[in-house]
Amino acid sequence: MGAALATDVHQHLWPDELVDRLRARRRPPYLDGWTLHTRGEAPYDVDPAHHDVARRVEADQEDGVGLACVSLSAPLGIENLVRPEAGALIAAWHEGARALPDHFADHRLVRGGQAR
C-alpha cells in the first residue's frame, strides 16, 4: 500500500478571474501587470508562478500533497471595501476557485481531509 498523500489546508491562489478583476481596478487593491497595490503598503511585485495552477499542482505533487485547500488572502484588504466592490472581487475568486482542478478545494468544502 502506498503512502497517504498530505492535505495542505492553507494555500492562497489567485485564479485568472480574480487576477482579471484586480487588473480592471484603479484603486487598492489592484494589479498593474503583476505589481500589487494595496492600501497602506508599498507596491509589491508578485511572482506569477505562485498563481500558475499547473506549476502549483506539480510542486504540491513533488512535496507529497494530494489535496490543497485554497482561500482568499486577507492582506489584499478586500474585506475593507464597500460591499459592491468587495462582492465583485469575492465572486471572481469563488468563480475561479470552482473551476480549479480536483487537486484544489475551496476552504468551505473540506471535511475530514476529503473534498466534497
Image (tube, rainbow, N blue to C red):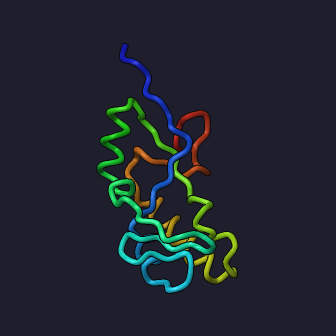
Q: Quadrant of residue 23?
A: bottom left
Where residue 42 appears, as percent x and y from the top left, is 53, 70
Q: Quadrant of residue 58?
A: top left
Instruction: Say if 11 sits above or below 44 in the image.
Output: above
Q: Is residue 84 left or right of residue 20?
A: right
Instruction: Say if 116 sits above or below 48 in the image.
Output: above
Instruction: Say if 5 sits above or below 102 in the image.
Output: above
Where residue 20 appears, as percent x and y from the top left, is 41, 76
The residue sitting at 44% across, 75% down in the picture is: 31
The residue sitting at 55% across, 34% down in the picture is: 113
The residue sitting at 41% across, 65% down in the picture is: 45
Quadrant of the snapshot with the N terminus: top left
Where residue 22 appears, as percent x and y from the top left, is 47, 76
Where residue 88 appears, as percent x and y from the top left, is 56, 78
Q: Nearer the viewer, residue 32 or 43?
A: 43
The residue sitting at 41% across, 71% down in the picture is: 35
Q: Residue furthest bottom?
A: 26
Instruction: Say if 2 sits above or below 111 in the image.
Output: above
Q: Residue furthest front?
A: 42
Q: Is residue 98 left or right of residue 77?
A: left
